[in-house]
């Protein structure tokens, strides 16, 4: 692989690592009911979003003469979408903290669990940039499926809590929004893994 391509892959890997770190910051902020970790998170994601256009252009340019680069072309956009969802999660958590929005104990456990699963998902998503490994891709795919399945299950349980009057009405749209953004992050992570490894499978045939 040419040096400039290796450099771009390292940049992509750093994007994934930054996203993983930010999800961890979201988890910390939510658990400790503190908006302080969100500042670092937003700075990292803003930098990621600003880096995306130039990186996509460079990868697209290199892909014209090097087919092996093509699977990487869409990765910056997916990371940008992940960054956008992370920012939306940060906004939700900040609202919870600053306005003292009360989640039920069950809702706190559910969001905490899903954020932890996202952290576990983002590491192999980053690593697959440098090591296009089918085993890593399978892990990402199964993790994404698990996150979506749990999020849908939690949405149903949330409706039941609303009916029972356990959930505070003002918390409901925030909780649902958080579930949606968590699913979005998992989906875009899986798309990165699928794009990279499906191209490998095609090349091998």
Image (cartoon, rainbow, N blue to C red):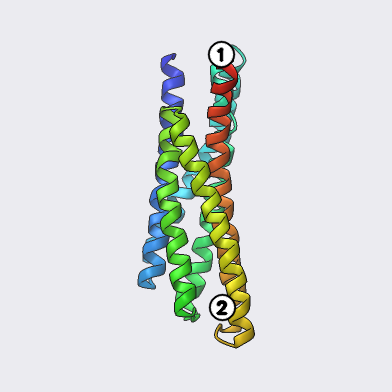
* Residue 46 in picture, x, y percent from top left: 50, 49
Tell me the element at label 1. Answer: loop
Tell me the crowding category of disc 2: few under 14, some 14 to 19, or many 20 or more residues within 10 angstroms, Cα based.
some
Q: Is residue 172 left or right of residue 100?
A: right
C-alpha span from label 1 to label 2: 50 Å
Q: Residue drawn 62% across and 15% down?
A: 64
Look at mark 1 in the image and give the residue it sits on: 66
Examine the rendered structure and indicate whether residue 22 appears above or below residue 156: above
Residue 123's disc is none
Residue at point 38% right, 69% down? 31
Which of 171 and 204 lies nearest the eye of the viewer? 204
Q: Position of residue 3 (x, y in %)?
A: 41, 16
Task: Name the disc covering residue 171, or none.
Answer: 2
User: Is residue 19 at least partly visible in the picture?
Assistant: no
Q: How many other residues sit within 10 Å of disc 1, few (<14), some (14-19) or many (≥20)?
A: some
Q: Residue at x 54, y 61 (%)?
A: 150
């Amino acid at each position: 692989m040419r040096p400039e391509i290796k450099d771009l892959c390292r940049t992509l890997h750093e994007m994934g690592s930054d996203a993983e770190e930010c999800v961890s910051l979201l988890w910390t902020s939510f658990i400790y009911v503190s908006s302080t970790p969100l500042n670092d998170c937003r700075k990292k994601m803003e930098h990621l979003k600003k880096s995306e256009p130039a990186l996509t252009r460079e990868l697209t340019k290199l892909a014209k003469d090097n087919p092996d680069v093509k699977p990487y072309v869409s990765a910056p956009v997916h990371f940008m979408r992940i960054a956008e969802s992370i920012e939306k999660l940060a906004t939700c958590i900040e609202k919870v903290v600053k306005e003292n929005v009360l989640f039920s104990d069950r809702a706190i456990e559910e969001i905490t669990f899903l954020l932890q699963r996202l952290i576990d998902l983002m590491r192999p998503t980053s690593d697959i940039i440098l090591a296009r490994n089918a085993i890593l891709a399978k892990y990402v795919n199964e993790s994404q499926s698990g996150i979506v399945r749990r999020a849908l299950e939690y949405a149903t349980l949330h409706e039941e809590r609303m009916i029972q009057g356990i959930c505070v009405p003002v918390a409901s749209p925030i909780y649902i929004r958080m579930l949606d953004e968590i699913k979005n992050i998992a989906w875009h992570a899986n798309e990165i893994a699928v794009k990279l490894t499906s191209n490998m499978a095609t090349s091998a045939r």
